[in-house]
Image (cartoon, rainbow, N blue to C red):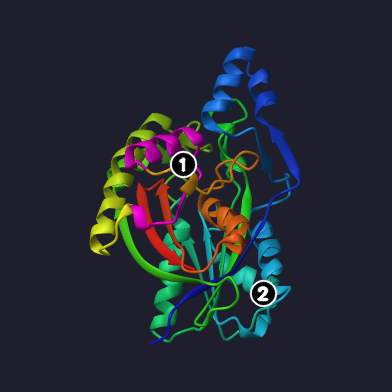
Amino acid sequence: MDKAYINNVQYHLPEKIESNSEILQSAKYDNTKIDKMIEKIGIVSRRIASDGEYSNDLGIIAGKKILKNYDSKKIQYLIFCTNTPEYSLPTNACIIQDKLGLEKNIGAIDIILACSGYVYSLSLAKSLILSDQAKQILLITSDTYSKFISKKDAGTRILFGDGATSTLITNQKKTHGFEIKNFVYGTDGSGFQNAVIHNFGSRHWKNKVSSGDNLNLNGPGIYEFALKRVPEAVNVFLKKNSITLDEIDYFVFHQANKYIIDNLQSKLKISKNKLLMNMNEIGNTSSSSIPIVLSKHLPKIKENKKILLIGFGGGLSWGISLINS
């Protein structure tokens, strides 16, 4: 039976840099509070898409980085994961297929999911390979949350950055390849109001909700959800796969912010030197946050190492996967 491997991960960030210190100063926070807030969230600056730059644009550039050293004719399926799609109709993956010059006899699908989206997308890619529907898959994640955050909402604005990633997943292991192992998932739609853009869909398309054009984020609600559900899910995964926490070599949490990750690390009693991070000058890039970390660290990781990927966020949704070098 075929196995599924992550064989290359690339990312792309917009050129514009937005300083959190400057955002908070403009919002009239005093310097002492600014320093404490930035230290708490662990995000100094973020990359922001320009006015004419959207999630498809970033995703196409990320995809081209993979295809620079890989024959586009070999790609048999395209998965595009975003929570800020450029179009509700048509499917954005179809547009990206054309822009990347991929073959026309391939599958192309959008996955509308937030911060757990990368883990869920990996599960779909693995399923396609194991069911012999595709052997070479291009997974692209891309989000431009800055388009949906009010300029007046400094507390939310300092968390989110824009960015995109591309992942090559195939049935054969290449140099620095990582086998995609098992998964656990979780969903609690009763908490959907913790992260919602009311007018970004057909329900309020013509009769818009007041202030519904922007991301409505309940930070304390997301924190409470993460601290409750993520440790439970990790323990379920470990039990299901007969593995202990100590056997995991590295952990990659969704890069929500430093405060949440620090508390998860403490609650799970994970050694800090096992955490792989990359948010200081990027911020929370939703479904791109885990693969951005992977793109930085995977080439340096030795053989026979286990990495646990932990996505969680809007939906409410969470997912965990193990990859092995």
In the displayed structure, would residue 111 be above or below residue 168? above
Q: Is residue 19 left or right of residue 195?
A: right
Which element is circle 2 on? helix
Q: Quadrant of residue 261?
A: top left
* Residue, disc 1: 272
**Numbered badge on residue 1:** none
Residue in view at x 42 percent, y 40 percent: 195
Residue drawn at point x = 73 percent, y = 45 percent? 50
Residue in view at x 29 percent, y 51 percent = 233
Q: Say which residue label 2 marks.
A: 98
Give whichever of 213, 59 is nearer the camera.
59
Residue 312's place in the image compared with 8, above or below, is above
Query: What residue span does the magenta drawing correspond to?
Result: 246-269
Whether residue 193 is in magenta: the answer is no
Residue 70 falls left or right of residue 247: right
Where residue 4 appears, as percent x and y from the top left, is: 46, 77
Q: CA distance from mark 2 to mark 1?
A: 43 Å
Q: Nearer the viewer, mark 2 or mark 1?
A: 1
**Which residue lies most toward the right here?**
15
Residue type at tag 1: Lys
Closer to the N terminus: mark 2 or mark 1?
2
* Residue kind at label 2, given as amino acid type: Asp
Q: Horizontal placement of 47 versus 193: left or right? A: right
Q: Is residue 250 magenta?
A: yes
Q: Position of residue 294 (x, y in %)?
A: 56, 58
The residue depicted at 57 percent of the width and 86 percent of the height is: 105
182 or 79, which lies in front? 182
Q: What percent of the width, then of the height, locates residue 80? A: 54, 65
Instruction: Say which quarter of the image contains residue 191.
Output: top left
